[in-house]
């Protein structure tokens, strides 16, 4: 016996027994619907819960937009911070006439220059701190021959060139120093700057070996100087204060070894001379006296050469060779015409920083985002599976 | 199934979700679906309230291109119902008559007999099969919407529904 003849009959019967909600429940649900379905969570009303609910309720597109905007803002802020602080080595003012404090950290900050207006920012190179290894009693910062090159707007200086440090060193080591400094001056100021160079040399008790000065457009000046090493710092500070410094280069060379060698050879030669003089006084045969005299003459010549060599070495230590150039041109400080080329350069610089920030950010965020995505997908799959299994239970 | 429900089914997909309208047209259908699946009136009320609350929170995420508003709503309701099933840890047993006798007008002994017969037959179905019956005949979804809700095609949903109807008829016949 069939109760339902076909599916339509059964469907009609099912419609007859369709469950209907209680009136109380319907009214209560209607009230909640009118109120916008207020949350019944324990945390409802707390700021954190409100924010979390706001995030959850955001549509995906808005969430993506908000996330992208936040990321862009973060990149912009990081770019501005890096661009303003500089990702390049830190530049600090330097006082050329003051010693560089030696620190184990390797990077020293130098005091502000009080040298008449020109201040320099410099990149202070890291200095090895193996003071006594292989350098005898030499200071860690000054014993090694070293040099530092400065670009025209970046002024770099090696630590070992500070006056007091070298003064201390010179008691133990024979250090030859040299320096080269280029100044940028307006064409009309070349003559005046040259006069200031002469004055600075005079104040430092230095010597002008050679100088050339030309005025007018494209003019300039060149000075080859000998400056007492003990006053080199003062002199360089004075040169730097004359006009804008475009570049500066300083170098040291430890000539202790050739000095000691020459001294030892001189002592030996002198000893041989003394010995020959003794032989000469006791020689009785003419031919023997002539032979000793000839040998004595040669030894004395050798001693003279060694003394000259020592004198030159000592002079190289006592006086530092300094080359000062004055180039005429427009000061970078007065180059106020910021043009399209500068704009491209700046834009490229900023874009490069932004790209770097983005790359670093992606390197940090991408793996985390991938893990979060995998976790989210896994959680969804697990939940879906559990829900389907609930139907089969 | 109310007239509003029929109008909703036959109307073209909405671009913007009119939640108020969706609620008014689907409240009783969601309850009927939940009660038919869970066979527990109190649980069905909880699931209905939770489903509408979740839908309200997610209303801005509704995408008309991915299906009708009713299919979207019943997807949420299904998740809430299955969560309830998971929470209970067992398939819902008939604790109360899913057909709320108190809310139904007394239409005589024949109707009461019909309700008991169908109720017993539905109890013999698996939850997955009972869900199909609830979605189709209690909630009034089309086969396409059912497919969207349970994650299959419309034709496959129709096939499953046909088999379930056969099984339900056999259960009814066996009860006689």
Image (cartoon, rainbow, N blue to C red):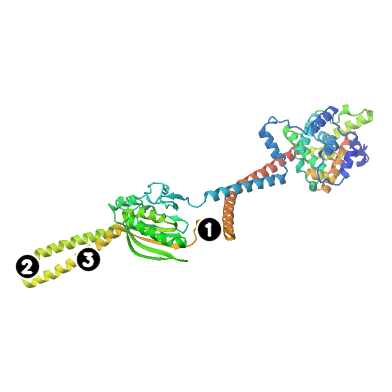
The image quadrant of residue A238 is: bottom left
> From the viewer's perspective, is A297 left or right of A112?
left
Callout 2 and callout 3 share a chain: yes
Rendered residue at 79%/47% (across/down): B66
Q: Identify the element where label 3 is drawn.
A: helix
Tell me: residue B10, above or below residue A135: above
Tell me: residue A376, above or below residue A311: above
**Numbered badge on residue B147:** none
- Residue B60 at what x, y percent from top left? 76, 42
Residue at the extreme left: A284
- Residue A393 at what x, y percent from top left? 75, 37
Q: Nearer the viewer, mark 2 or mark 3?
A: 3
Q: Nearer the viewer, mark 1 or mark 2?
A: 1
10 Å neighbourhood of mark 2: few (<14), some, or many (≥20)?
A: some
Q: Which residue is mark 2?
A: A283
**Chain bearing mark 2:** A
Q: Which residue is mark 1?
A: A335
- Residue A104 at what x, y percent from top left? 39, 46
Q: Which residue is mark 3?
A: A305
Please report contact status of discs 1 and 3: CB closer than 8 Å, yes or no. no
* Distance between the alpha carbons at the discs numbered 1 and 2: 82 Å
Q: Earlier in the sequence, mark 1 or mark 3?
A: 3
Please report contact status of discs 1 and 2: CB closer than 8 Å, yes or no. no
Q: Nearer the viewer, residue A63 or B131?
A: A63
């Amino acid at each position: 016996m069939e109760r339902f003849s076909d599916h339509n009959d059964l469907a009609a019967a099912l419609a007859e027994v369709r469950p209907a909600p209680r009136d109380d429940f319907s009214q209560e649900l209607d009230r909640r619907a009118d109120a916008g379905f207020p949350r019944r969570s324990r945390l409802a009303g707390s700021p954190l819960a409100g924010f979390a609910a706001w995030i959850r309720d955001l549509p995906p597109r808005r969430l993506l937009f908000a996330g992208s905007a936040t990321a862009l803002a973060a990149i912009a802020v990081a770019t501005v911070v890096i661009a303003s602080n500089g990702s390049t080595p830190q530049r600090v003012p330097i006082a050329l006439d003051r010693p560089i404090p030696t620190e184990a950290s390797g990077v020293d900050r130098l005091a502000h220059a009080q040298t008449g207006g020109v201040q320099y920012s410099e990149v202070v190179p890291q200095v090895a701190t193996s003071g006594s290894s292989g350098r005898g009693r030499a200071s860690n910062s000054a014993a090694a021959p070293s040099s530092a090159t400065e670009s025209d707007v970046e002024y770099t200086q090696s630590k070992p060139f500070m006056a007091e440090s070298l003064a201390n060193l010179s008691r133990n080591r024979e250090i030859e120093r040299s320096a080269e400094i280029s100044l940028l001056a307006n064409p009309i100021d070349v003559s005046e700057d040259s006069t200031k160079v002469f004055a600075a040399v005079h104040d430092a008790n230095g010597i002008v070996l050679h100088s050339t000065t030309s005025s007018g457009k494209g003019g300039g000046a060149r000075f080859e100087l000998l400056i007492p090493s003990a006053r080199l710092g003062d002199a360089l500070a004075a040169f730097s204060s004359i006009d804008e410094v475009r570049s500066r280069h300083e170098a040291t060379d430890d000539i202790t070894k050739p000095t000691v060698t020459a001294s030892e050879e001189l002592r030996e030669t002198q000893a041989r001379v003394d010995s020959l003089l003794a032989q000469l006084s006791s020689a009785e045969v003419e031919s023997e006296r002539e032979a000793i005299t000839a040998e004595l003459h040669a030894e004395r010549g050798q001693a003279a050469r060694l003394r000259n060599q020592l004198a030159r070495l000592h002079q190289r230590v006592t006086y530092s060779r300094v080359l000062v150039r004055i180039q005429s041109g427009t000061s970078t400080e007065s180059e106020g015409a910021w043009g399209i080329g500068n704009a491209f350069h700046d834009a490229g610089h900023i874009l490069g920083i932004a790209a770097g920030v983005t790359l670093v950010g992606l390197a940090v965020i991408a793996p985390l985002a991938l893990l979060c995505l995998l976790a989210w997908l896994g959680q969804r799959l697990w939940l879906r599976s559990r829900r389907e299994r609930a139907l089969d239970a | 199934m109310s007239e509003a429900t029929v109008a909703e089914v036959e109307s073209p997909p909405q671009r913007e979700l009119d939640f108020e309208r969706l609620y008014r047209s689907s409240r009783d259908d969601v309850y009927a679906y939940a009660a038919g699946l869970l066979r527990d009136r109190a649980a069905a009320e909880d699931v209905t309230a939770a489903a509408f609350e979740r839908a309200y929170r997610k209303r801005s995420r509704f995408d008309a291109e991915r299906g009708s508003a009713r299919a979207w709503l019943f997807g949420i309701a299904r998740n809430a119902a299955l969560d309830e099933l998971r929470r209970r840890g067992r398939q819902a047993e008939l604790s109360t008559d899913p057909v709320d006798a108190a809310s139904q007008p007394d239409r005589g002994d024949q109707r009461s007999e019909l309700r008991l017969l169908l109720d017993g037959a539905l109890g013999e179905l698996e939850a997955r099969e009972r869900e199909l019956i609830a979605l189709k005949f209690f909630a009034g979804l089309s086969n396409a919407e059912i497919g969207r809700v349970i994650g299959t095609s419309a034709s496959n949903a129709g096939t499953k529904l046909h088999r379930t109807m056969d099984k339900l008829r056999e259960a009814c016949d066996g009860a006689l």
